[in-house]
Image (spheres, rainbow, N blue to C red):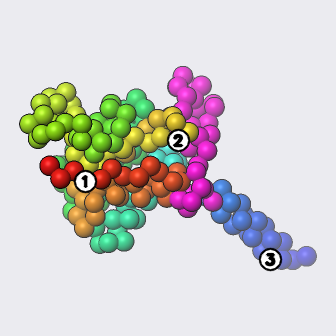
Amino acid sequence: MTATRRLIPALAMAVFAASASHAYAQGAQKLPLAKAVQGPEDAKRILARDWISADIAEQIVQACVDAAKAVNGSVSVFVLSPDGEVANMYRMDGQGTVQTQTALRKAQTALQRRQSTHQASLQFSTVEQRQLHAPQGYFLVPGGMPIIVDDVIIGAIGVGGGRNINDEQCAHTALTKVLGPQPPLPERATR
């Protein structure tokens, strides 16, 4: 058997293995917790379990960026680990300090409140009540979501500065693509 003939079956197996490992990342199947978090050796090293893996954080950010690019849009995206540190982030062209900072603050608020920033904002009946909570560090604007797998918060995502794309929808689309089905988004308030 020539080297080329041996290489073709090996390449086919590699492609199949790669596609099988990303079968969950199509939005139809729920990604198991063990595939979304750091491995046991990394968890042992930092003395923490169930932190989003660098690979999954990068996939989520890339899925949001891809969604924005598909509509000729632009966003800033942050994915945080459960301790609030940046696991991954991306600032597309056309995004400035305000856009990146709102994305970060949305992710921080979702992590602190353990709910989407949209859901958190609906708990306050007026803009004035929302502004009263701003000094506590909350940024009650849609676009931030906790990242939950098997009822465990493994991080949070924040999307800001959406041009041609809704920040909250971008985050939801990215989470669905990488982690599988997500709870439906809350309806927009009419207040």
Q: Mark 1 and mark 3: span between their CA atoms?
A: 58 Å
Q: Element type at marker 1?
A: loop
> Which residue is disc 3 drawn over?
4
Pick whichever, 124 or 134, lies toward us.
124
Answer with mark 1 or mark 3, whichever residue precedes in sequence: 3
Q: Is residue 129 left or right of residue 145?
A: left
Please tell me the numbered disc located at residue 188: 1
Amino acid at dot 2: Val
Q: Is residue 125 visible?
A: yes
Q: Is residue 32 magenta?
A: yes
Residue 139 visible in rendering: no
Which marked residue is nearer to the observer: mark 2 or mark 1?
1
Secondary-structure class at tag 3: helix
* Label 2 vs 1, first from the N-terminus: 2
Q: Residue at x 40, y 29 (%)?
A: 83
Relative placement, left or right, of 60 versus 134 is right
Judge left or right: residue 107 versus residue 149: left
**Relative height, residue 180 to residue 51 (above, below):** below
CA gap, disc 2 and disc 1: 25 Å
Q: Residue 51: where, in percent of width, then height? A: 50, 34
Residue tagged 2: 149
Labels 1, 3: front one: 1
Contact between marks 1 and 3 (CB within 8 A): the answer is no
Where residue 190 appears, as percent x and y from the top left, is 18, 53
Residue furthest top as drawn: 47
Q: Give, as a single range, the part of the protein colored magenta.
A: 23-52
Q: Amino acid at mark 1?
A: Arg
Q: Give the residue displayed 69% in from the left and 66% down from the top.
A: 15
Packing grade of label 1 (10 A; few <14, some 14-19, many >=20) is few
